[in-house]
Amino acid sequence: MATTYLSKTQIAGTSTRKMTISAWVKRSGLVGYAKGAIWSMGSDSSNFIELQFNDADRLELKAKNSGSYVMRKATNALYRDTSAWYHIVVGIDSDQSTPADRNKIYINGVQYAGTWDTDTDATVNTDFKMNSTSEDARCGRDYMSGAAVYFDGDMAHVHYIDG
């Protein structure tokens, strides 16, 4: 398992409500919760937004503000193929009036339309903990736990678009 990740302290961003993340990922292991995030941004374990495979091998997008979840979406589909590359794209826009339009997840070019294991949409105009000089963007490490937890797998072409 890797013990490295990429990190960048943000300069003033353009939006705390809109972003897009795109990444190609290939999982190495499926054991235990500590799989780390594909991508995360925040200041601490109480203020972050994060994309990861959770302990049930579901893709999960979650965000906390001041210790409370403001968004939490986990697919019902399982992602356990350690020989496959997954192309994941997440779009977030909390300015949208329809809850389902505030976050969209695409896996291998298809918008996820299945049932959700966890399904909490952000309220309209939610300001996420991202894009300010007090937040770090991380590729391959989470904010959820107090200890460093690294993504267990390979990543390629990870892109983050502010706004």
Image: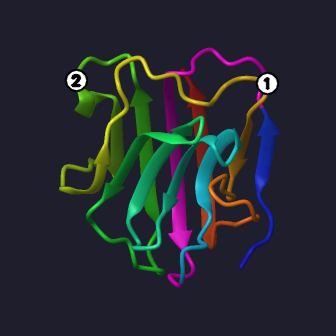
SS at circle 1: loop
Q: Residue at x 54, y 81 (%)?
A: 32
If the image is split into quadrants, where does the N terminus sit?
A: bottom right
CB within 8 Å, label 2 to label 1: no
If the image is split into quadrants, where does the C terminus sit?
A: top right
Query: Compared to 73, does 19 lie above or below?
Result: above
Q: Residue furthest front?
A: 67
Segment colored magenta: 10-31
**Labels 2 and 1: the sequence-earlier one:** 2
SS at circle 2: loop
Tell me where residue 50 appears, x and y as whole percent.
55, 48
**Residue 156 highlighted magenta (yes or no):** no
- The residue that mark 2 highlights is 98
State the mark number for residue 133: 1
Q: Residue at x 42, y 31 (%)?
A: 92
Q: Residue at x 54, y 74 (%)?
A: 33
**Residue 29 highlighted magenta (yes or no):** yes
Which amino acid, mark 2?
Thr
Q: Residue at x 61, y 73 (%)?
A: 34
- The front one of 156 and 15 is 15
Q: Is residue 60 left or right of residue 161?
A: left
For the residues marked 2 and 1, what is the alpha-carbon distance in whole angstroms?
A: 30 Å
Tell me where residue 143 appears, x and y as whole percent.
67, 52
Q: Is residue 140 left or right of residue 31?
A: right
Which amino acid, mark 1?
Thr
Query: Compared to 157, does 52 lie above or below?
Result: below
- The front one of 101 and 108 is 101
Q: Residues within 10 Å of mark 1 (few under 14, many from 20)?
A: few
Q: Is residue 10 left or right of residue 111?
A: right
State the mark number for residue 6: none
Tell me where residue 111 appears, x and y as whole percent.
26, 46
Q: Residues within 10 Å of mark 2 (few under 14, many from 20)?
A: few
